[in-house]
Image (cartoon, rainbow, N blue to C red):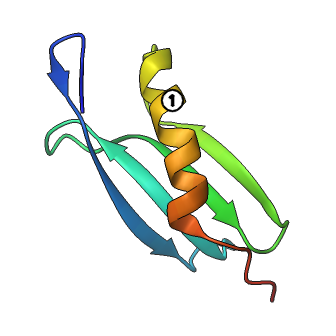
Amino acid sequence: MVVHGIEYRFCRASSVVHGRDGLAWECWRGNAGPVFEIFRNDGSMRFEVTLFEQDVPLELLEFAIPIAREQLGDFDPL
């Protein structure tokens, strides 16, 4: 996806480290690291957004949230 002339890509990742259990949908800009993640937290049974950069374009979040809910699927309680 391109927003304001910057290309972003998305990937799905699992996370079972540092007390986290669930799946993440990450947004990356190039190879610089993730811009944000949408995390399906199976421990708390809720979705969480973590921003790794400031000033993330709202259009990017509006695009990503509904797709992340679909891609990450149902909660898998412990």
- Asked whether, in this view, residue 6 is left or right of residue 69, the answer is left
Residue at image location 56% in from the left, 66% down from the top: 72
Q: Is residue 31 above or below residue 18?
A: above
- Asked whether, in this view, residue 34 is left or right of residue 75, the answer is left
For mark 1, does the 10 Å Cα neighbourhood hold few (<14), some (14 to 19), or many (20 or more) residues?
Answer: some
The answer to which quarter of the image holds residue 21 is bottom right
Q: Is residue 44 above or below residue 63?
A: below
Query: How many numbered callouts?
Result: 1
Label 1 element class: helix
Residue type for callout 1: Leu
Decide which of 64, 77 is in the foreground and name it: 64
Spot occupied by residue 75 in the image (x, y as percentages of width and height)? 74, 75
- Asked whether, in this view, residue 37 is left or right of residue 26, the answer is right
The answer to which quarter of the image holds residue 16 is bottom right
The residue under label 1 is 61
Residue at image location 80% in from the left, 74% down from the top: 43
Spot occupied by residue 59 in the image (x, y as percentages of width and height)? 45, 19
- Residue 54 visible in the snapshot: no
Spot occupied by residue 27 in the image (x, y as percentages of width and height)? 36, 44
Where is the N terminus found, in terms of image quarters? Answer: top left
Spot occupied by residue 51 in the image (x, y as percentages of width and height)? 52, 34
